[in-house]
Amino acid sequence: MKQVNQVENGAKFLADTAHWRSHDKCLWAARMRRDQVAQNIPEWEEMRLLASDIKRHTLSNLDYYLEEFERNAIANGIHVHWAIDAEEHNQIVYDIFKAHNVKVVTKGKSMLMDECGMREFMGERGIEIFEADLGERIQQLSNERASHIVMPAIHKLRGDVAKLFAKHMGSDPKNDDPHYLNGVMRKDMRKNYVKVDAGMSGANFGIAETGGIVVCTNEGNADISANVPPLYVVSMGIEKLIPRASDVPLFVRLLSRSALGFHVTQYTSHYHGPREGQEMHIVIVDNGRADRLATPGYSEVLKCIRCSACLNTCPVFRRTGGLSYDAPYMGPIGIVLEPSYDLHRYAQLPYACTHCGSCANVCPVHVPIPSLVFRWRDIVVEKGEDQLAHRLEMDVSEKVLKTEYRLVWAEKFALAALRHMPKGLANSKLNPWATEHSNPEPPQQTFREYYQQEQKDKNVSDNQTT
Ligand code: SF4
């Protein structure tokens, strides 16, 4: 399969100034809100450390907690299934639907189901799925994947949504008022809710001690899926477990504040079994997670609670948009997660990083994204999946940096080239950096020459004083 070229995809997004500026502004606003609410909690940093420790402990004893969860869930009247990979997950869900003659499904937002390609799988088998999350539904109607973990359509402008709804629901294409657009969607979805045979959702947390799950949403979309239909199916990755019910408040406090800078999500729903007359299933999915857990130096990636704080703060993500990653997971967490699904296809993603380190500063569970980026770059080079131009760059750099003599001459050469290069060339389209910046005047001497001269002058002046 062709490699994803994030640079090329991102350049297309950047070419549309209105879209990238709005995207950048919205995400930076979420990042700023996150900082403000975090600063109001004196124990914020202790909370992050504690959450990281709880996740690490759970992952180190995952077999124990998974069995405990399964036991308690079954005791609560839930049917528990195990899926080794995406295919098995989809097949299990399909078999459940087939047994209940399900034709129409409503689904809350779930990254895992996107990862498994579940909607497409069901579509091919004649099962219609309606996304209940507004952003996800917008993306479904656009025939696009989510561009952000918690704000799936954040790359779109209100005008884009107005046109989309007009095309699919006959609304006014010129009215981009959010209340109006919400109303259009609500009216349309209500028709669908009454005819659904089953509901689906993901899970933010699975509690081993109680065998129940917690789902956090801002629109109640999981609650519609869980409460309205007679059949409710949950998909949950094995890494979603936390040991005790008393751990939930810590994670809920961290999640919403890190995601959008809000004190709490609008709906934090706990499901501990089917309601009366309903059937409830949980499909527990591996899909490569056990391998990630068993890989030294990589297991920490499983601590991720999918809050998206790292996306909101990432300068690359904010300017290039989530669709440029062409993957279910995007942004900083995506570039260290996706290569583990398909190294060839996602080999360029670990290079979509400026090494600012901001993702590590905001992650509520201390996923060490910057060091995982380096780890993946090593693997990409080792496996020969790196770009030829990049390999040549590295080979030349290695030769130059190996001896001081070569470096000194490289510095002199680079400065001479900068000083004598025609100005128009440095500021031409060949240098994309120059489109938003002005180049400074090159200095008369290299920094090394300047520093040596300074030291010499200082020694002369010191000798004269003594
Ligand atoms: S890596 Fe950390 S900041 Fe990024 S989505 Fe996961 S938990 Fe949130």
Image (cartoon, helix red, strand yellow):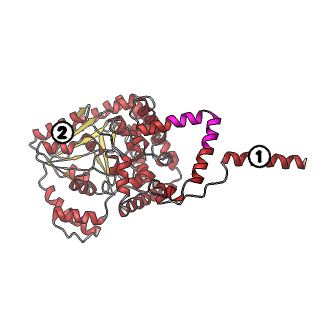
Left or right: residue 189 compared with residue 24: left
| Residue designated by label 2 | 93
- Helix, strand or loop at label 2? It is helix
Give residue 435's position: percent from left, percent from top. Answer: 46, 59
Q: 281 or 444, which lies in front?
A: 444
Q: Which amino acid, mark 1?
A: Gln
To which quarter of the image does residue 422 belong? bottom right
Give residue 251's position: percent from left, percent from top. Answer: 41, 46
| Residue designated by label 1 | 455
Left or right: residue 51 compared with residue 164: right
Q: Is residue 241 visible?
A: no
Q: Decide: is 254 above or below 296.
A: below
| Mark 1–mark 2 distance (CA, rounded to whole Å) | 73 Å
Q: Which numbered disc, 1 or 2, marks the residue that appears first in the sequence?
A: 2
Give residue 315's position: percent from left, percent from top. Answer: 45, 53
| Residue that sits furthest to the right in the current view | 466
Q: Which amino acid, mark 2?
A: Val
Q: 400 or 353, which lies in front?
A: 400
Q: Decide: is 10 above or below 404.
A: below
Quadrant in which the N terminus appears: top left
Q: Is residue 294 visible?
A: yes
**Ligand 1 sits in quadrant:** top left
Crowd around label 2: few <14 · some 14–19 · many ≥20 (10 Å): many
Q: Which residues are magenta?
A: 395-411
Question: Predominant secondary structure in magenta?
Answer: helix
Magenta segment: does it hold 361? no
Give residue 386's position: percent from left, percent from top. Answer: 41, 36
Magenta segment: does it hold 399? yes
Crowd around label 1: few <14 · some 14–19 · many ≥20 (10 Å): few
- Helix, strand or loop at label 1? It is helix
Q: 25 or 288, which lies in front?
A: 25
